[in-house]
Image: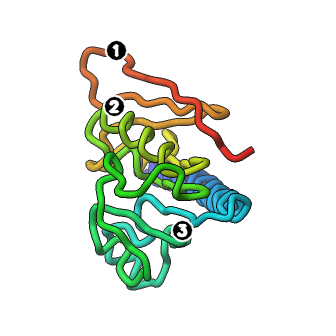
């Protein structure tokens, strides 16, 4: 009986350690890309657009005063609660951004595209992000994150390799991969 409990405790600790490592990697990547986006916007002498508010729609972030990332110069989200308190917040859909072409030096979009319902929506969003900014900086949840697998609001798998961004529709029962590739300027 004790062996069973020790085995279960060992497995549980292993999973917790693994998820902490995944979360730490995602957080490091997010802060690194945010800093790169801010530097890129400064280089172009234009504002930084944040697509997807730093507070998300979770009250817990605000209660603990822990934004997911910086707020940039302009913050865009479909929910005001995600950027509440930001001096320049805009309620808009990421597939129809109400700014002129190349108005921003960079756009930072963290954990945003996977919430869009289809690959076509993600296509339009990426086109819009590329239209309004000189460079696009994306952060996506890891496939190794248990949270990414169980989050009901995630409709797409999004991943990057070098400057290419790939999409795959989740829950595709046909087993076919619906991935598309975009080359975006990563501000290198």
| Residue identified by numbered label 2 | 119
Q: Earlier in the sequence, mark 3 or mark 1?
A: 3
Above or below 177: residue 26: below
Dot 2, how many residues are within 10 Å of its Cα: few (below 14), some (14-19), or many (20+)? many
Rendered residue at 46%/47% (across/down): 129
**Other residues around mark 1 within 10 Å, as few (<14) / some (14–19) / many (≥20):** few
> Foreground residue, 9 or 66?
66
Q: CA distance from mark 3 to mark 1?
A: 35 Å
On-image quarter of the C terminus: top right
* Image position, residue 94 (x, y; %): 35, 51
In the rendered image, is residue 13 in sight? no
Mark 3 crowdedness (10 Å alpha carbons): few <14, some 14-19, many ≥20: some
Which of pointers 3 and 1 indicates the residue nearer the eye? Answer: 3
Q: Quadrant of residue 179?
A: top left
Mark 1 and mark 2: Cα distance apart in space: 13 Å
Q: Where does label 3 land, which residue?
A: 69
In the rendered image, which residue does mark 1 sit on? 176
Mark 3 to mark 2 CA distance (whole Å): 25 Å
Determine which quarter of the picture holds residue 39.
bottom right
N-term-proximal mark, 1 vs 2: 2
Q: Position of residue 31 (x, y in %)?
A: 64, 62
* Cβ atoms under marks 3 and 2 closer than 8 Å: no
Looking at the image, is mark 3 or mark 2 earlier in the sequence?
3
Horizontal side of 174 relative to 165 (left or right) equals left
Query: Which is nearer the eye, 110 or 177?
Result: 110
């Amino acid at each position: 009986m004790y062996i069973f409990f020790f085995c279960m405790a060992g497995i549980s600790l292993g999973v917790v350690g693994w998820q902490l490592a995944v979360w730490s990697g995602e957080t490091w990547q997010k802060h690194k890309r945010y800093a790169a986006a801010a530097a890129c916007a400064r280089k172009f002498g234009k504002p930084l657009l944040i697509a997807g508010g730093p507070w998300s729609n979770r009250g817990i972030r605000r209660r603990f005063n822990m934004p997911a990332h910086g707020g940039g110069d302009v913050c865009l989200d479909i929910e005001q609660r995600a950027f509440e308190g930001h001096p320049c917040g805009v309620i808009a859909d990421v597939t129809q951004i109400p700014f002129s072409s190349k108005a921003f030096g960079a756009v930072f979009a963290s954990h945003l595209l996977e919430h869009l319902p289809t690959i076509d929506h993600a296509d339009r969003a990426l086109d819009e992000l590329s239209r309004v900014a000189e460079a696009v900086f994306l952060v996506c949840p890891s496939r190794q994150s248990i949270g990414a697998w169980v989050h009901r609001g995630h409709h797409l798998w999004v991943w990057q390799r070098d400057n290419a961004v790939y999409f795959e529709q989740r829950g595709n029962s046909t087993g076919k991969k619906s991935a598309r590739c975009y080359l975006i300027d990563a501000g290198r």
